[in-house]
Image (spheres, rainbow, N blue to C red):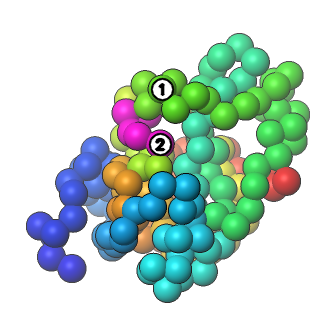
Amino acid sequence: MSKKSYPITPAVRFLREHQIAYEAHLYDYEEHGGTARCAQELHVDEHCVIKTIILQDDKKQGLIMLMHGDKEISTRQLARIIGARHIEPASPAQANKWSGYLVGGTSPFACKSALPVYVESSILDLDTIYINGGKRGFLVAIAAKDLQVLQPQAVEAVA
């Protein structure tokens, strides 16, 4: 794929700046299509498509959780791990404010606000992951080990 055929988002700039090898993948974004749609279009295992979810705790502090596309987050388990009473998804407007990305195009790279990042520990065992590149319909394939640039805390929070 030609470098000019995909968007140059803040996430792409971040990957370049940190010299992280990536492969761009465009697909036809479908509202509420989720990771199953991406995986189907790209012919990859949905388990390797990673969701970037902006959450907030009971003090209205934001955080990012990276989860396998075919799994759900146990917000109760995550709250226990981080010492919060409650965790819930941030509203789309709040998620946009913190991340700078539209819901459906949220990348953990180059967010507007410095949010703590949590990653489902089994993601780090994968070779290649497909994660949002900062725009709806745009994923980047990277080595899972390259998530370390985000200094994430590995957790076990699958529902």
Across and down, in percent, residue 20 comes to 35, 62
In the rendered structure, does residue 2 fall within the stretch colored magenta?
no
- The quarter of the displayed image where residue 141 is located: bottom left
- Read off the magenta span: 99-103
Considering depth in this image, is 22 or 75 the residue closer to the camera? 75
Across and down, in percent, residue 120 comes to 71, 55
Q: Which residue is mark 1?
A: 93
Q: Is residue 115 above or below residue 138?
A: above
- The quarter of the displayed image where residue 102 is located: top left
From this viewpoint, is residue 98 visible?
A: no
Q: Is residue 64 above or below residue 134?
A: above
Q: Which residue sits at x=61%, y=29%?
A: 90
Across and down, in percent, residue 94 comes to 51, 24
From this viewpoint, is residue 128 visible?
A: yes
Q: Is residue 22 left or right of residue 68?
A: left
Across and down, in percent, residue 17 comes to 25, 51
Extreme-top residue of the structure: 59
Q: Which residue is mark 2?
A: 103
Extreme-bottom residue of the structure: 43
Label 2 CA crowd tier, 10 Å (few <14, some 14–19, many 20+): some
The quarter of the image holding the N terminus is bottom left
Q: Which residue sits at x=43%, y=25%?
A: 97
- The kind of secondary structure the magenta stretch mainly shows is loop
Q: Which residue sits at x=36%, y=68%?
A: 28
Indicate the amino acid at tag 2. Answer: Val
Secondary structure of the residue carrying tag 1 is helix
